[in-house]
Image: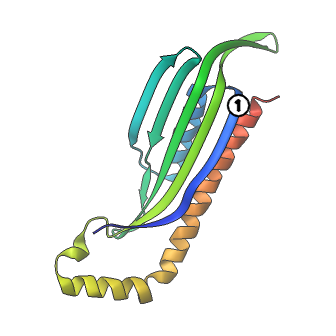
């Protein structure tokens, strides 16, 4: 059975102002490619409301460290009240989006994600001993690596959104 070890639990980021949804999504996908994550989009909802567009996107990128350990980041993006605005910058008109953006980041490690150690009861005992005594220093390193990646992604998004403030 797959075991999940939660490393980052519901790290939040909110922003209200001007930004480009398209450029933000592009930034996230480029960051994931740069760090070697494979990407899966589990949810993509877009609806038009009287206040503006409502967009909800959930990404589930993963990265295999070994055949036994895999890291996953769940990125939930909720954009509400999105309206298209034309802004003039240095004499050039640029189309941007104005609204509210919320991000929720979850990071966790999955062990035995291929269910190789669940075939016999003896394997389960060996796996438990293996995890507790032999693999715990490696797990600490993988947890730190995953946490650094989540914090780096949040920092990049925060820096990107702060570009539009001024």
Residue 157 image offset from top left, x and y in percent: 65, 41
| Residue indicated by mark 1 | 16
Residue 77 image offset from top left, x and y in percent: 54, 38
Could you say which is closer to the camera, residue 11 or residue 159?
11
* Res 26 quadrant in image: top right
Locate residue 139 relative to residue 102 in the image: left or right.
left
Residue 105 image offset from top left, x and y in percent: 55, 50
Could you say which is closer to the camera, residue 9 or residue 122?
9
> What residue is rendered at 67% in x and 45% in y?
156
> What residue is rendered at 76% in x and 33% in y?
163
Q: Quadrant of the C terminus?
A: top right
Residue 126 image offset from top left, x and y in percent: 29, 87
> What residue is rendered at 47% in x and 35% in y?
57
Residue sitting farthest toward the front: 50
Locate residue 117 relative to residue 83 in the image: left or right.
left
What element does badge 1 sit on?
strand
> What residue is rendered at 20% in x and 87% in y?
122
Could you say which is closer to the camera, residue 141 or residue 84?
84
Q: Tag 1: Cα neighbours inside 10 Å, few (<14), some, or many (≥20)? A: some
Residue 1 vertical placement versus 83 (above, below): below
Residue 48 vertical placement versus 38 (above, below): above
Q: Quadrant of the N terminus?
A: bottom left
Residue 5 vertical placement versus 58 (above, below): below
Q: Taking the image as drawn, is residue 36 in sight? A: yes
């Amino acid at each position: 059975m797959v075991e999940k070890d939660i490393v980052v639990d519901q790290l939040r980021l909110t922003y209200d102002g001007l930004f480009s949804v398209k450029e933000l999504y592009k930034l996230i996908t480029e960051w994931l490619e740069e760090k070697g994550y494979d990407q899966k989009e589990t949810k993509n909802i877009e609806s038009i409301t009287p206040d503006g567009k409502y967009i909800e996107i959930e990404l589930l990128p993963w990265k295999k460290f070994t055949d036994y350990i895999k890291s996953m980041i769940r990125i939930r993006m909720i954009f509400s009240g999105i309206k298209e605005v034309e802004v003039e910058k240095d004499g050039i008109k640029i189309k941007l989006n104005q609204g509210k953006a919320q991000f929720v980041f979850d990071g966790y490690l999955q062990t035995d994600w291929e269910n190789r150690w669940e075939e016999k009861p003896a394997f389960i005992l060996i796996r438990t001993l293996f995890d507790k005594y032999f693999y715990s220093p490696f797990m600490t390193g993988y947890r730190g690596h995953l946490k650094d990646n989540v914090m780096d992604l949040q920092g990049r998004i925060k820096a990107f959104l702060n570009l539009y403030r001024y």
